[in-house]
Amino acid sequence: VCGAGIIMGVSARVTQAPGGGATNFDVGCTGAGNDDQFVQNVSSALSTTAIYPANGDGTNTPWVQKTATTMTVTTDANVTGASMIVRVCAYYMPSIAPTS
């Protein structure tokens, strides 16, 4: 979950490869209509890494997030059998209103 602020970078690492036919994955803000904003079409093989903006879709760098949000990992096919595990880290600067 990222709060309101500026997302300066996102990194991801596959720690468990998926079962089934999934070969690639994306990472984006949940409900933003841009599922591959931070990671786009990167291999879902074990130990694969990705970093935004280098592996993102090329839009909005850095990304200004006006409200708190979650990130979603999607795959190019259904994951069956073994679950896929991806560790995602967001590097962001919160935007907090002054208190006085």
Image: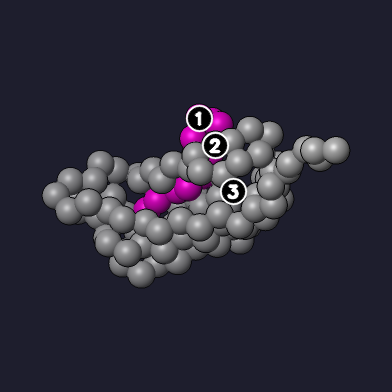
For residue 31, the mark is 1
- Under mark 2, the amino acid is Thr
Left or right of 89 in this view: 18 = left
The residue at the far left in this view is 81
- Under mark 1, the amino acid is Gly
Mark-to-mark CA distance, 2 and 1: 9 Å
Circle 1 — which element? loop
Left or right of 54 in this view: 60 = right
Which residue appears at 56% of the width and 31% of the height? 32
- Under mark 3, the amino acid is Asp
**Is the residue marked by circle 1 packed among few (<14), some (14-19), or many (20+) residues within 10 Å?**
few
Circle 2 — which element? loop
Which residue appears at 17% of the width and 53% of the height? 82
Compared with 39, 98 (above or below) is above
Which residue appears at 51% of the width and 43% of the height? 1
In front: label 3 or label 2: 2
Q: Which residue is denoted by mark 3 in the rendering?
A: 57
Q: Which residue is denoted by mark 2 in the rendering?
A: 69
